């Protein structure tokens, strides 16, 4: 962390359809220079691999060599064992002490066990990378019990004499650790991963945990979890815990160490919002703590330490832990003595940024900055109706709406994923990759040599971080065109489709480095066949559709034409226009109509062609299939149950980081569970997460949310894969350098998608649009806040007021444009007076305001607005080649896109205009039900 060293926490964000909720204030402004220099390890190196650096990274060793004082765990009588009546490390069995020293001490032949944690300060609910090295006894068998492994979990600390968390505690108490609920990598039928202490009866004798060491089969056998408020929780092992379970826990139960003594895992650091029992992140209105602990417990094979009755908090095993102290951000509730208020609503993609800027503005000048997330079209509707005076938008308002447009950020929608590598030989080879021993069989398996095969096999279970996708592949996932996207049994017309995106020939051509096996099980097939998306309309979704429809091959596929492999779109999602294959249209439509007629559909389904972009929802609604199963009360499951959505892109990132969002496939009946209203019941998601080593989940999220959870994101490619671009600070700057002017002065938009020069094709500028007719005091308040945001607020980092990872600092051109707009706002003049929008082609826009990433001149994307999009038919009558071509002339942006004025044709033709508007507004008013969070930090 830099010298501003701040503590912190988290607060649930409130989305409101009126754009006025959540005036949670904080921090003010010291106008920062446009060319402010960022420091090293400030997070600006966020990348498609899901990695970034931090200056608060820490490395600890099992033998304490070089460990920070707070992270030392003595391996002698100086270590007191909690709950043992004063016993010490010396009281632990010599067999266990010697075995651990041999496997993990500095004399183990690999330098000793080392654990590096990528970030330890300024934490919110996010992901950190935990890298393990220098262990012995490892294995590459994912989930195996035969090798060394580590258990990783979070503890809040220790209780002081005053009954409150002790900020000066030198060690966490094992009772305060969120562990024992079984993480996604748990191995069944072993107490080594529970809160079990039965094998340590001798050590526990005389201590307050003695009863748990001698408990009988009918008694509670696990020591209670002690909550941060001092309350003891129910039995975790008996599923009576009210504070965490296998679905909500962040623990990693069995992180296998490989044959080189290494392991790498992403770990979610949970705040008091996600884990109330931990209470990490100080807040004045409830029990909480500024510091928590990350605990890593190394484990040995059963043939070395054979007692299976000892979980990670059992004294003999707990004594072997490594620990790293974590500092979380505070959660303030107001801006003390705020002199004025500036309210702003809109773009959810700026949630992380405003979580930092809001307290930054308060600290600098005691100005309360209120931010609420609402769908982008709703924000523009509110502005036009006079309900909001300042909104965030990537699109200009209608020409009759006066506004001063201040560029505040560069971000982008991205395709995030969690994909564990499971290499396999092609099914046609008839070979099992683990049994290949000859060069000839290695070649049959698709490898150049046996050494290459064995090297690839050693990666089994590791997370894929170099994925490439095309517009066509993404369109197939959005339209549930893969066989795995359908509930079982799939309709007969899907029999010829690939099982999932991994089986698609184009995916395999784009990703030749991957020898992925086929997905086992319907649930996994669903995860690799679809994208987890948000339910609210957004400018990010509009950008996705503009990009997809500007690609000729994708536009033709959505219209009903077959692709190069003769695959056609799910007939329920065809626009039925057959662009590029007109001579086949009659045959293709007859086949599609027969497929629709033969499918069991929900009673509410109306058979009409889809229009793109969809009008009634951000992405096509999955309501085309009813599986016909006889459920209690004859309720059948629908495709909507099978393909859940999230309330925001922040949630889609978090859920995908955790392995995906399960389908609502378990029937819950009100006669046995009164919470399952309305009667007679409903389908709910089963508990638990995808098993580690076999996770497959894909999502559309925003770049900042992906960076927060260290979620890998796909490189986007033209259809033949000759050019690809991934979202990074540099690629966003490259795209910004080629933004086009709009007809509204002061506002720019992305241009056509060309990848060759490294410009990320979905880059978006976000503007604060402020009403210039406000009273002078109000205009000055907005101007002061925006001066901070576009100055100091553009410095990348993890502290209050910084620009969080996942955003690119404004370019020099956009910074200058912001200064002109802020000056116009202070003067009360209309936007763009004397400013023709920006003219990126001749203004040197590729210069950046922070020199951490060099901007490369490049072309940008076709991410235009939610207006009408007409895709020109490619020449000829066959399927387009799919090569990425400039389609700028085919994409039209209509300024001022508002909440939907017409029902979508994909599934809502029966809804009228008033209901369509109501739905759009309700999506904003549903804030208290959403888990979208705004992160704030204040000084200690």
Image: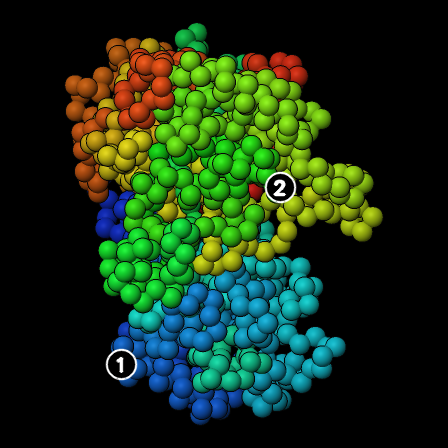
Residue 326 lies in quadrant: bottom left
Which quarter of the figure is the N terminus placed in? Answer: bottom left
Rounded to the nearest whole Å, what is the CA distance between mark 1 and mark 2?
54 Å
Q: Could you tell whether 798 is left or right of 855 in the image? A: right
Q: Residue at x 54, y 75 (%)?
A: 192
Residue 535 lies in quadrant: top right
* Label located before the other in sequence (1 or 2): 1
Residue mark closest to the camera, 1 vs 2: 2
Q: Residue at x 58, y 35 (%)?
A: 492
- The answer to whether residue 783 is visible is no
Q: Could you tell whether 107 is left or right of 284 in the image? A: left
- Which residue of the protein is positioned furthest toward the right in this rendering? 671
- Residue 561 pos. (x, y %): 43, 22
In the image shown, does 318 or 610 lie closer to the viewer? 610
Q: Residue at x 26, y 12 (%)?
A: 836
Report the colour scheme: rainbow
Q: Which mark is residue 419?
A: none
Secondary structure found at label 2: loop
Residue 218 lies in quadrant: bottom right
Report which residue position mark 2 lands on.
489
- The answer to whether residue 53 is visible is yes
- Residue 784 pos. (x, y %): 36, 29
Report which residue position mark 1 lands on.
109
- Residue 325 pos. (x, y %): 41, 65
């Amino acid at each position: 962390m830099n010298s501003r060293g701040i503590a912190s926490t988290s607060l649930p964000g409130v989305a409101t359809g009126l754009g006025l909720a959540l005036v949670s204030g904080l921090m003010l402004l010291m106008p920062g220079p446009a060319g402010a220099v960022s420091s090293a390890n400030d997070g600006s190196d966020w990348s498609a691999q899901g990695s970034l650096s931090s200056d608060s990274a820490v490395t600890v060793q099992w033998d304490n060599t070089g460990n920070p004082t707070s992270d030392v765990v003595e391996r002698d009588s100086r270590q007191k064992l909690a709950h043992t009546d004063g016993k010490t490390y010396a009281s632990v069995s010599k067999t266990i002490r010697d075995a651990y020293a041999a496997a993990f001490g500095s004399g183990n032949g690999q330098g000793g066990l080392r654990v590096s944690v990528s970030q330890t300060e300024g934490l919110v609910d996010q992901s950190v990378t935990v890298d393990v090295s220098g262990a012995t006894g490892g294995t590459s068998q994912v989930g195996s019990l035969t090798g060394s492994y580590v258990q990783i979990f979070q503890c809040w600390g220790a209780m002081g004499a005053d009954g409150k968390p002790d900020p000066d505690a030198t060690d966490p108490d094992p009772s305060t650790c969120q562990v024992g609920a079984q993480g996604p990598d748990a191995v069944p039928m072993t107490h080594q991963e529970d809160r079990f202490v039965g094998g340590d009866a001798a050590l526990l004798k005389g201590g307050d945990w003695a009863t748990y060491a001698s408990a009988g089969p009918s008694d509670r056998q696990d020591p209670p979890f002690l909550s941060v408020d001092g309350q003891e929780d129910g039995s975790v092992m008996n599923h009576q815990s009210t504070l965490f379970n296998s679905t909500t826990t962040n623990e990693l139960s069995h992180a296998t160490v490989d044959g080189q003594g290494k392991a790498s895992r992403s770990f979610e650091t949970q705040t008091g919002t996600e884990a109330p029992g931990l209470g990490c992140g100080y807040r004045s209105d409830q029990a909480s703590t500024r510091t928590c602990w990350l605990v890593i417990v190394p484990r040995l094979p059963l043939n070395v330490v054979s007692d299976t009755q000892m979980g990670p908090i059992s004294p003999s095993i707990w004594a072997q832990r490594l620990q790293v102290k974590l500092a979380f951000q505070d959660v303030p509730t107001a801006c003390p003595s705020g002199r004025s208020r500036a309210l702003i609503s809109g773009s959810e993609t700026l949630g992380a940024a405003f979580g930092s800027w809001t307290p930054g503005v308060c600290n600098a000048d005691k100005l309360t900055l209120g931010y609420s997330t609402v769908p982008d079209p709703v924000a523009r509707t509110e502005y036009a109706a006079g309900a909001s005076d300042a909104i965030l938008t990537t699109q200009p308002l209608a020409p009759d709406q006066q506004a001063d447009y201040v560029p505040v950020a560069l971000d982008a929608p991205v395709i995030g994923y969690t994909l564990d590598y499971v290499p396999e030989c092609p099914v046609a080879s008839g070979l099992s990759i683990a049994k290949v021993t000859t060069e000839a069989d290695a070649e049959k398996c698709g490898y150049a040599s046996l050494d290459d095969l064995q090297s690839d096999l050693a990666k089994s279970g590791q997370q894929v971080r170099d994925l490439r996708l095309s517009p066509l592949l993404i369109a197939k996932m959005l339209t549930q065109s893969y066989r795995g996207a359908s509930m079982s049994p799939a309709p007969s017309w899907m029999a010829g489709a690939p099982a999932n995106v991994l089986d698609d020939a184009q995916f395999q051509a784009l990703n030749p480095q991957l020898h992925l096996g086929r997905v086992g099980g319907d649930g996994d097939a669903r995860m690799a066949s679809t994208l987890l998306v948000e339910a609210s309309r957004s400018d990010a979704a509009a950008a996705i559709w503009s990009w997809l429809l500007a690609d000729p091959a994708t536009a033709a596929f959505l219209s009903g034409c077959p692709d190069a492999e003769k695959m056609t779109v799910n007939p329920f999602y065809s626009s039925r226009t057959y662009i590029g294959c007109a001579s086949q249209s009659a045959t293709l439509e007859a086949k599609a109509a027969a497929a629709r007629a033969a499918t069991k559909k929900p009673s509410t389904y109306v058979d009409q062609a889809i229009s793109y972009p969809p009008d009634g929802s951000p992405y096509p609604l999955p309501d085309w299939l009813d599986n016909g199963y006889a459920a209690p009360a004859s309720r059948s499951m629908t495709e909507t149950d099978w393909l859940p959505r999230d309330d925001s892109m922040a949630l889609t990132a978090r859920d995908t980081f955790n392995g995906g969002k399960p389908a609502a496939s378990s029937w819950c009946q009100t006669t046995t569970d009164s919470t399952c209203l309305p009667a007679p019941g409903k389908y709910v998601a089963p508990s638990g997460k995808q098993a580690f080593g076999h996770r497959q989940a894909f999502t559309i999220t925003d770049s900042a949310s992906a960076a927060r959870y260290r979620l890998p994101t796909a490189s986007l490619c033209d259809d033949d894969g000759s050019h690809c671009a991934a979202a990074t600070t540099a690629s966003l700057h490259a795209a910004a350098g080629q933004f086009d002017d709009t007809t509204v002065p002061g506002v720019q938009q992305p241009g056509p998608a060309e990848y060759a020069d490294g410009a990320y094709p979905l880059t978006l500028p976000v503007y604060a649009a402020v009403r210039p007719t406000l009273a002078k005091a109000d205009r000055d308040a907005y101007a002061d806040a925006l001066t901070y945001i576009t100055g100091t607020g553009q410095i990348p980092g993890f502290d209050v007021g910084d620009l969080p990872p996942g955003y690119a600092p404004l370019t020099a051109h956009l910074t200058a444009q912001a200064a002109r707009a802020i000056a116009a706002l202070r003067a009360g003049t209309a936007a763009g007076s004397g400013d023709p929008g920006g003219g990126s082609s001749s203004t040197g826009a590729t210069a950046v305001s922070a020199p951490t990433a060099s901007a490369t001149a490049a072309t940008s994307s076709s991410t235009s607005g939610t207006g009408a999009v007409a895709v020109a038919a490619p020449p000829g009558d066959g399927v387009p080649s799919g090569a990425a071509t400039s389609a700028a002339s085919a994409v039209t942006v209509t300024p001022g896109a508002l909440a939907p004025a017409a029902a979508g044709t994909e599934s809502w033709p029966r809804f009228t205009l008033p209901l369509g508007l109501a739905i759009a507004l309700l999506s904003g008013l549903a804030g208290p039900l959403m888990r979208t969070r705004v992160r704030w930090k204040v000084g200690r």
